[in-house]
Structure formats: structure tokens, C-alpha cells
Image (cartoon, helix red, strand yellow):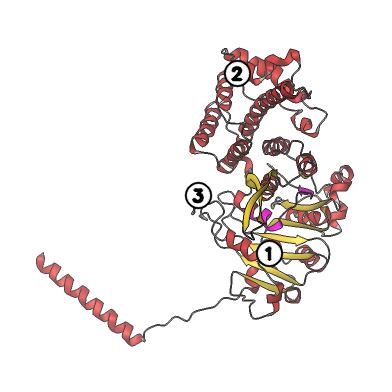
Amino acid sequence: MITGELKNQIDKLWLEFWQGGIANPLTVIEQITFLMFCRLLDINETRDEKRSKRTGQSFRRRFNDDQQHIRWSDFIHIEDAERLHTLVRDEVFKHIREHNSDTRFGDYMKDARLAIDKPSLLQKAVRMIDKLPLEAGDTKGDLYEYLLGKLTTAGINGQFRTPRHIIKLMVRMLEPKPNEVVSDPACGTAGFLVAVLEYLLETYTSPDGVIRETVTLENGKTEEQAIYTGDLLDQEQWAHIKGKMFHGFDFDATMLRIAAMNLYMHGAEDPDIHYQDTLAQSFAEKFPKAERDGFDVVLANPPFKGSLDEDTINPAILRLVKTKKTELLFVAQILRMLKTGGRSATIVPQGVLFGSSTAHQALRELLIEQNQLEAVINLPSGVFRPYAGVATAILIFTKGGSTDHVWFYDLQDDGFSLDDKRDRLYDSDFAGDLPKVLEAWKGRDKKTATGKKNDRTAACFWVSREDIADNKYDLSVNRYKEVVYEEEQYDPPKKILARMKKLEAEIMKEMDELERML
């Protein structure tokens, strides 16, 4: 968590950019990202220099002897705004473009340029970023998440993120493991991938860094003792997490740079992020190991609105579902991207659940008959307000096998108001029905699917494959949820009429008194 003071610093920095004539939130975040990266390079260089001096071990330097003047700790002291602007534009950003050019991270920075034209704005931004606590890993990630939250606030150009509390629910339901490979085929700012990284840190690291176990003493009593200090992840697992675990694809170059920096800020030093349309034939050609049977886990909130030209779509996807609608194509492609036994949590518009077209029904039949559709989580229609009022749902499915029963949950309260303001209703950002969904999911038991305990009037319940197939594979929760109607009791008409006459008499009496007063 970041404090109100740190939030105020980010707010002031954002305001400086807006007042300086840069209003597009993507541009603001991109420029702040570059400057944060400059400072992080210097922070990491200083850290390695101290370690090398202490241990005598060499390291890969980020700045040569003739580049010391472009280190953050050096140019931060330049008082002349024009001179600072020239140095940052011509030399510092050149270094950003060329830094680690042989790595995937270097690819994201090869088009970096300074978009701040006013020297005074750059000087203010540099000084304000210098005050941010980027040395602290947790705070650094939280700061960047708060910065990305400005996309939701601004909502310009249709750019807004999936709400973090919904992402957190999806990640916790899938429970990714540290040895798995995770992807998002439309990653945006990499919110899902970062949430997986945070989940792993939360799950596989003790709160205070000390792992304990209960041991039995010689006298028969038990005592909790520290086994060792550190993480529950070994070096091989950490290497996997930092460089091989996360794979994201998007066709917005600015978003990719932000996504790469978001993961970098959270500890994934070399994420596999690519400029690529995952529905295109070119994706299959460039990434054959990724586009088919490549991932253990896929988390996604793919674009809903859109209709593509058929000749631009990978024919292998069209063989699964013949359509031009992106929301159907993405689900089919996610199935292709998963390994057999791999699992996904994907957000879809509710039209996918009940659409009557041949393509809609074919996709749902594919999920049910040739894969294991585990759950359908109905979301409130206000989750994406104020930018989209479309009703959505989360599909959780596993590739391969077939479905016998589907678990439904009708989520009504996501912890925020469902109007355009989306005000937080509780102290926690994971509140309302979200903890209930997670608890019910972990405690679900298919043995209750055919018994009396399967109460379809409750928030969650089971529906059989046969029942779904009989309804043309309709997956809308209202199709199967039973509503109990309470009969209203009304007084007899004569009694109601007598009350009305009495009220009318009282009104006439008061009017007579008013008339006498006049």
C-alpha cells in the first residue's frame, strides 16, 4: 500500500504534465515510465557497484566511463533547464534506446523518445520523480499501479484497465504455480501478468521472510520454530519467474512499453512481451510454440467490440468457430493457446453466453463437449463503468476432456458502487461478494450437483451438461437460477376504499378550516 502523501506526489506530477500541455494519459504514463527507468538504471548501477566493491565480483555495467554524466544521480543536479532538456533528449534517451538492445526488454525501448517539449516541465518532472521511493520493491510496484490507475480515471481513447479486484479474483481462482507458463493474448498494461506475479510473492513468501514449522520437543510439548529465513522459491523458480514465465501480446506499441515496465517494476526483469495480433495468421507463423499448446494458464479480458475481415484471421481459429466477432474468436484462440490440461479465466460480454447465432452456439458447444467448462461467474453490469455499461461474465475452463457439470455464481456486489463514480463501499478493495465467490469456489463439491443441496435459488449452484445442451448450450445464469416469489398480501377492496374515504374527509375538513381563516 502507498500512503496518501505518495499518492499526492503522483497526482501533482500528473497535474504538471496536464498543465504543461500533455493531456493524453498514455503519453503521460509513457514519459514518466521512461524517466523512472532512467532512475532505476542508476539505482541498480549504484547497488551493483557497492556489491562489487564489497565482494570483488564484476558485473555487467549499464554506464561506461564516458557515460557517467548521463546517470540520474549526475544530471539531477543540472540547474539550467535548457541544458537538462538537451542532455536528456539527445543523450539519455539514446542510452535508453540502446540499453540491453540484445534483450527482449531492449526491444520495447528501441523507439523511446522524449515527448516533453518544455524544458521547465522536464525539470519539474525529474525533480518530482527523484523524490519517489523507487528503491523499495513493493512501494515501487504499488506506485506504478497507482500511476496506471490514472488510465481508468482518464479513459481517453478508450484506454482503461480491467478493475484490479476482478483480476485478483480471477488469479486466485486459477491459483497459478511458480513453474507454470502464463499468457495474456491481449495484455494491455499487463495487469493480469502482474497480478500473477503478486500472487506468487504472496503465496510463496512468508509475511516476515521467516518460514516456521511446529516441532515436538523431548518433553512431548510442541513449539513453533523457525526453519530458515527466506522465500519458498528456489533460484531456478525465481529465474523462471523473472524471464520465462510471463508472455503477453498486444498490437499497441505504447501499451507494450508500459506493460514491460509494469512487469519490470514488479520484479520480472525480462518478460516476453510482443507486438502481435494473436488472431492473425502472422502470430501462428512467428510464434508457433505459443499460438498452439503453449501455456499452462491464460488470463484475459480481450476486446469485445469489433468485427474483423475474414482474410486477416488465422484459418485455424475459423475452423473452430466461423465468425468475425472478436469476443468469440479470442475464446477459440485461447483454447488453442492452452496446453492440454491448461486452464483459463477469461472475461466475455454476456452475449457470448446466450447469443443465438450459429457461431455463438458452436463456441459454447466446443467449451462444453470438447473441454471442461468449470464455471460461469456472472458480473454486475456496472463493473466497467463509466466507460462501458455492457454486462460481462468470467468463464473458467480447462482444455481437453468434456464437461459434466458447470458451476454458476451470480455475483451482485463487487465492492464498488455500480454507477459512473464507482466509489469504494468497503475498507478493502477485495470485498462485497468477491471473498464469498472465492470461498465457495474453493469449497465447491460436485457431489452436491445432483443432490438436494444443489439449491438453484442460491448465489451459486450446479447445472448438468445435459440441461445446458437441452437449452442450446445457453450459459446465462438467469436461464437456470430459480427465483422464489413471495406472495404479497393486500387488504380487501372495501377496507382500502374505507381508508380512502376517511383520508378524503380529513382533507376536506382541513380545507374548510383554511377557508374560514381567509
Q: CA distance from mark 1 to mark 3?
A: 27 Å
Question: Which quadrant of the rendered structure holds the N terminus?
Answer: top right
Q: Is residue 120 visible?
A: yes
Between 212 and 71, the one lying in front of the other is: 212
Between 348 and 94, the one lying in front of the other is: 94
Between 412 and 366, the one lying in front of the other is: 412
Considering only vertical position in the picture, is 106 above or below 343?
A: above
Mark 1 vs 3, N-terminal side: 1
Judged from the image, the secondary structure of the residue bearing numbered disc 3 is loop
Query: Which label is found at residue 421?
Result: 3
On the image, numbered disc 1 is attached to which residue?
A: 376
Residue type at the position of mark 1: Val
Magenta part of the chain: 169-184
Instruction: Residue 95: give x, y in percent of width and height.
Output: 74, 21
Residue type at the position of mark 3: Lys
Considering only vertical position in the picture, is 130 above or below 319?
A: above
349 relative position to 430: left or right: right
Q: Is residue 275 visible?
A: no
Judged from the image, the secondary structure of the residue bearing numbered disc 2 is loop
Residue 177 on the magenta span = yes
Mark 2 vs 3, N-terminal side: 2
Residue 126 on the magenta span = no
Judged from the image, the secondary structure of the residue bearing numbered disc 1 is strand
On the image, numbered disc 2 is attached to which residue?
A: 76
Q: Residue at x 47, y 81 (%)?
A: 487
Residue type at the position of mark 2: Ile
Q: Residue furthest front?
A: 219
Q: Residue at x 87, y 58 (%)?
A: 319
